[in-house]
Image: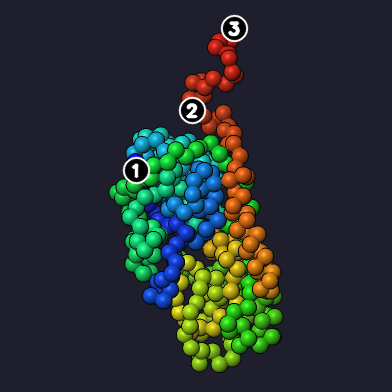
Amino acid sequence: MSLTVISIGPACTLQDQGRTGFLEQGLSRSGAADILAVHEGAALLGQSPDLAALEMAGMGGRFEAGQTVSIALTGAPMQATIDGAPVVWNASHTLEKGQKLNIGAATAGTYGYLTVCGGIATEPFLGSRSTHLTAKVGRALQAGDVLPIGASPGRAGRKLRVQDRFSGGTLRIVASFQTGLFDQATLDRFVSTSFLRGARANRMGMQLDSDGEGFAAKGQLNILSEVITPGDIQMTGTGNPFILLPECQTTGGYPRIATVLPCDLPQAAQTPAGASVRFEFVTLEQATALQSAFLSELSRLRGKVEDLVRDPHDIPDLLSYQLIGGMVSATD
């Protein structure tokens, strides 16, 4: 079973939940920028969230099914059609053999996800199929690529109701190793500032812009390089905050004013250019409870999947359906 890439947008990559255990070798985990979207796709298809999906940065592509397969579309909403007929986002659909799936630009957010029944079954590397562009592990997809698909029954015609996480908003943060190097006035100004996501953003991190002076720590030029993780907020020499994302470097010497909670990273990564972002400090105890609630929510996603009711106007072969059980003709 396979899915052929006819055309593809830039920086579209295969991602799963990433590879762990290699920080000391200088390799960050990579994995989906919006891990919640991967779980949503898996729930819609009734399969494991550990399977690899296609992550599309800002724009999708055109694909042809080698065999009939169920697919799910999650993450940043994108314009999508199957053989020209519009299909619903945050839902699962059947892609018949030879049919063409077209996914256009994102209408909100940044990263959209195409999950296929059985997952995209490329050869794993260090326990993961995730592409890591900055480490040159794998590469972005290209036109002509044929993606192998794992065997799985799957299901289609299902939908999920999701909350908006595609337009910025408030991100919850905890104190980091260097938070104490920022004086209280700077910290107060940081949480009272409304930032805009800048144009500089990729899977390594995203820059935030704001009016007024930048944010600096005491003695920040003397900070030793030490381990960093996705979610850390680094302050560069210009005083602009950078939120680090899945392909961030493993060590760094810029001061970190705080760390975004893992459960809020999907919202951070999905923030589109120009959208507003604010920060709110929470205690470590609150952060632990919020993260636990997020993990519980992931485990309950399958139970929230609903049947997808199609609009008759969108069914090209409507007359072939038996719409009323037992009816054969109008006279009957």
Q: Secondary structure at mark 3?
A: loop
Q: Residue at x 70, y 80 (%)?
A: 188
Q: Residues within 10 Å of mark 1 (few under 14, many from 20)?
A: many
Q: Earlier in the sequence, mark 2 or mark 1?
A: 1
Amino acid marked by disc 1: Ser
- Quarter of the image where the N terminus is located: top left
* Number of numbered discs visible in the structure rendering: 3
Residues at badges 2 and 1 in contact (C-beta under 8 Å)?
no
Residue 77: image location, x then y, percent: 54, 50
Q: Which residue is mark 1?
A: 2
Amino acid marked by disc 2: Pro
Q: Which residue is mark 3?
A: 331
Nearer-the-camera pick, 203 or 123: 123
Which quadrant of the view contains residue 27?
A: bottom left
Amino acid marked by disc 3: Thr
Q: Which residue is mark 2?
A: 316
Q: Earlier in the sequence, mark 3 or mark 2?
A: 2
Which quadrant of the view contains residue 255?
A: bottom right
Which tag is nearer the camera, tag 2 or tag 1? 1
Label 3 to label 2: alpha-carbon separation: 25 Å
Residue 14: image location, x then y, percent: 40, 56
